[in-house]
Image (cartoon, grey):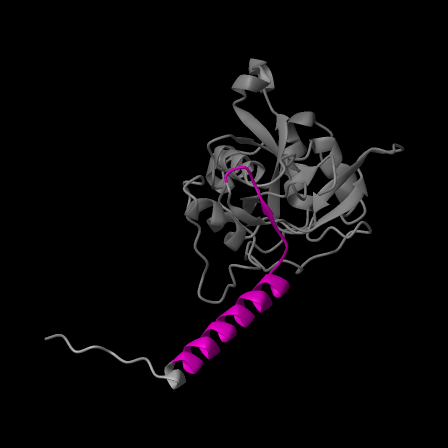
Amino acid sequence: MIAATLHRPADRIVLLGLGALVAALVLLVAIFLPRVSVGPAGKDTPQPELVPAVAEHGGQHVIYVMKHEVTVAEWNRCHADGVCALNLRTRPNQDAATTPATGLSYLDVGEYLAWINARSDGGYRLPRVAEWEHLAAPVLPEEPDPIFTDPDLTWASTYLLGEQKSRALRPQGSYTTSPDGIVDLDGNVWEWTQDCYAGASGASPSRCPAYFVAGEHLAAVPFLVRDPARGGCAVGSPPAHLGLRLVRDTPL
């Protein structure tokens, strides 16, 4: 014979107490978690902090710019969802939540864009070169007069006169904040733009072999390259790191 289990009133009191505790914890989590957007795929994606900024000289065109570059932690959410193929790692002394995501090709960036737009209300894109240069102008140093006047030696002037920043990857906030409130535009992470560099080939944007990345100077990098030191650069010293910062034409 199977013995019956008796549920005493004290057992019910304990169970009710645990239920109330769990409900309270759920309520606290709902209050204090960062704001998220539930996209069409039903996934919760924390939205990046955006700041408004005028994006052209003498104009009124306002765009909404990520205050910080995309971090390793943000990138790996895309990887965990199976959209971004690349899984980024940090060194033992780095915090994934504040370390910029780097080692990214243009194709990698396209995966992240597809992911964040599918899990939000959409609208994220890469900046245009003209937009990026205007945003960064207040924090980038003025270009010195070139040593060589021959256009074919522009790279030599840039290399010899340009400030050579350390290649060490530093956490967000290590460089300057622009008057608009955008952080690290003058850092050592070059950021992909949407502008195609076709060169002499005259390739159409739909079959673009390389894109401009913006940092201390502009560089043209082939769309498959993750390590700019091995992937070519139009002029000047090669970028130290390849990362991304997204913009929107409308606020959240």
> In the image, is residue 186 above or below residue 192?
below
Q: Residue 113 location in percent, x, y?
A: 56, 36
Work out which quarter of the rendered image holds the C terminus and state it: top right
What residue is at 67 percent from the left and 59 percent from the top? 173
> Residue 53 sits in which quadrant?
top right
Q: Which residues are magenta?
A: 12-41
**Is 38 in front, or is 187?**
38
Where does residue 80 sit, x and y in percent of width and height? Answer: 42, 48
Q: Position of residue 8 (x, y in %)?
A: 35, 83
Q: Is residue 49 above or below residue 18?
A: above
Q: In the rendered picture of this protein, how many numbered marks are placed on residues?
A: 0
State whether residue 144 appears in this view: no
Q: Nearer the viewer, residue 229 or 68?
A: 68
| Residue 28 lies in the magenta-colored region | yes
102 sits left or right of 67 in the view: left
Q: Main secondary structure of the magenta part?
A: helix
In the image shown, does 163 or 148 lie closer to the viewer?
163
Q: Residue at x 58, y 15 (%)?
A: 204
Residue 182 lies in the magenta stretch = no
Residue at the farthest right position = 58
Where does residue 136 sit, x and y in percent of width and height?
75, 44
Question: Is residue 42 something one can see in this rendering?
Answer: yes
